[in-house]
Amino acid sequence: QVQVVESGGGLVQPGGSLRLSCVVTGGTFSNFAMAWFRQAPGKEREFVSASRRGSSNTYHADSVKGRFALSRDNAKKTVHLQMNNLKPEDTAVYYCAATSTGLILSTLRIPTSYDYWGQGTQVTVSS
């Protein structure tokens, strides 16, 4: 059974940094496409960043491009989201998601493309 567990959220001032981590147990991690989504109160879940299986390329939403970086460690079955220059509008619950289904670029950003989800970790950016 595949389980996804996020960690690393918290309260940070504008301009600060946080690193989120996501550990996947069960399954073969290198076969998973991994992604981060976020959901702010009253808003729909939105795509943040993703990594396809078998590829070192990463993909980011325009709103975080240049500020966020995604990295994966297949040996540790972990994916990290490094978030720099955080803004109040980045405040949300951040979710890690995984799927063993091969995804094309057009489906990377769609939440329903992913089969496994973590419980979420709160990120609050406020002074």
Image (cartoon, grey):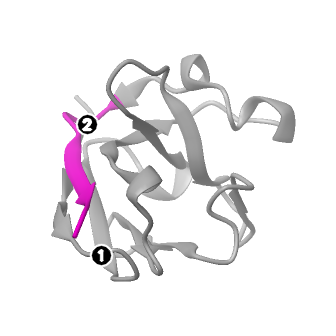
Mark 2 neighbour class, 10 Å CA radius: few under 14, some 14 to 19, many 20 or more: some
Amino acid type at circle 1 is Leu
Secondary structure of the residue carrying numbered label 1: strand
- Asked if the magenta segment contains residue 124, the reply would be yes
* Quadrant placement of the C terminus: bottom left
Residue 37 appearing in the image: yes
Earlier residue among tags 1 and 2: 1
Identify the residue shown where x is 29% and y is 57%.
22
Residue holding disc 1: 18
Secondary structure of the residue carrying numbered label 2: loop
- What distance separates the C-alpha of mark 1 from that of mark 2? 18 Å
* Quadrant placement of the N terminus: top left
Going by the image, does 121 lie left or right of 97? left
Stretch in magenta? 117-127
Which of these two is toward me, 83 or 7? 83
Identify the residue shown where x is 59% and y is 54%.
49
Going by the image, does 30 lie left or right of 117? right
Which of these two is toward me, 85 or 100? 85
